[in-house]
Amino acid sequence: MLDIQFIRENPELVQEKSEQKNVKVDIRQLLQLDEQRRGALQKIEELRAQRNTQAAGLKGQRPTEEQISAGRQLKEELARLESDLESIQDNYNDLLQAVPNVTPDDTPLGGEEANAPVKSWGETRSAEGVLDHLAWGEKRQMIDFERGAKVAGAKFYYLKGDLVPLELAVFQLGLSLAAKYGFTPMTVPHMVNTRTASGTGYLPRGEERQIYKIEGEDLNLIATAEIPITGYHAEEIIADKDLPILYVGLSPAYRMEAGAYGKHSKGLYRVHQFNKLELYVFCKPEDSEQWHEKLVQLEEELCQALEIPYQLVRIAAGDLGGPAYKKFDIEYWSPLDQSYRELMSCSNVTDYQSRRLNIRYRNPEGKTEFVHTLNGTAAAFSRTAIALIENHQQDDGTIRIPEALRPYMGGKENI
RNA sequence: GGAAGGGUGUCCGAGUGGUUGAAGGAAACGGUCUUGAAAACCGUCGUGCCGGCAACGGUACCGAGGGUUCGAAUCCCUCCCCUUCCGCCA
């Protein structure tokens, strides 16, 4: 959610930035509603003031008939105006919530095709002699989608054998790297209420529904640990000295991926459930840009430790979600595609989520301000597995375990 | 799941239906004292919204939402959460 005051002061800018994100919002209409809302509010407050002075004058004495009926009249008038305000307010809120975060001026314009590579690392290999991860995993009975489909449905799977310790090793490595940067490990509720889900920008309702809802309960399966971690400090005022707060959350991620079939849908690339290690930062506004860089650096370090060739990409306006101010992706090299594909993502959402969930801090002047929040993938194992299997395949068909993982796998060198 | 008791400001904690935005502590901040610090003492100290250049004024908020009343933190209803006991259970 954006600050209405900011929108009032910069209507053209907000309209333009929304259009760059391909989000349809009518800022003029929003501002009209805002005006109506404030007008109604003023009338209501005037009446309430009348009511309050009247009641104050009656303290401790029996009111006369006229006084009672005057009070009653006020009350009825108020009720009418309040219900008017409520319907204005509902429309206003819907519109306001639909306004996406703004972006910095150096954001590349356009859709996915405009994403701008920033740098790349590692040797890219050819497709020669490389089995795709699914064929490799099925051959070795380590990935089983057929039985996943039998017990749950399409895009559910089992991992078996050495892939399981590999997954744990990746998370251990990620955790220890994050610890080096000062992140506190966290496990989280895997279901959250609707307020928390929509406050973080994940809508449990509507056409764009992306997360699973539990029938008959106000509970939604999380799509990332980002959701419960953001909610962790909802409605709190954090002391200045406690910032920044750094968490690294480990959880499953459940995603409907409705309509996502087709492109890049083979195997583990796009699935309904995977485990994920997520980095999260609450910080002061002036520090968020710097933390964004640190998060990206941490992600790069992890890729390098895993010896995955990658490129770092600045995401274009049209490819950004509503909450994001600025976002980088790290894409792994896919030898089979001979191109890079998304592996990790890192966003600065500034105060977009904290405003909705009311997460503030008290600055040294004693004023409260919304914190900035950032999130970044440390490792989403389904995709990490693809990157490892396809990049570290050896002539004998085994996968070479990167040095950095071996301590967590009992020294094992290949699987 | 059953029974009982609770949810008040950054935290702890009072609160008879009408000078309660809310006593009293603590923390924090400013000051006095001190070579410095601590202690002691004095002072300041909720958040949002609306109006105003501002000083300030108005309004709302005591878990959430309804209701009763001229007037609700206080009474009633529904829901959520917490604590304790019982039941169930990895």
Image: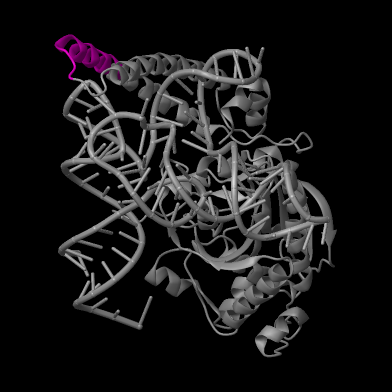
Residue A44: x percent and y percent?
Answer: 38, 17
Q: Which residue is drawn at 52% across and 43% down?
A: A358
Q: Which residue lies furthest to the top in this view?
A: A66
Residue A42, compared with residue A203, is above or below; it is above
| Image x and y of residue A225, in percent | 54, 60
Q: In this view, does A339 lie above or below A75?
A: below
Which stretch is magenta?
A: A62-78
User: Does residue A327 lie above or below A412 as drawn?
Assistant: above
Number of numbered callouts drawn: 0
**Colouring used for the render:** one colour
Query: Is residue A147 found left or right of A217 in the rendered image?
Result: right
Instruction: Please state which of residues A286 and B70 is positioned toward the viewer in this rendering.
Output: B70
Main SS of residues in magenta: helix
- The x and y percentages for residue B5 are 24, 58
- In the displayed structure, A392 sits above or below A72; it is below
| Foreground of the two, B6 or A319 | B6
Inspect the magenta stretch and tell me whether residue A71 lies in it.
yes
Residue A394 or residue A209, whichever sits in front? A209
Q: Position of residue A39 (x, y in %)?
A: 45, 14
For image coordinates 57% across by 22% down, the residue present is: A27
- Picture quadrant where residue A120 is located: bottom right
- Is residue A177 among what the camera can see? yes
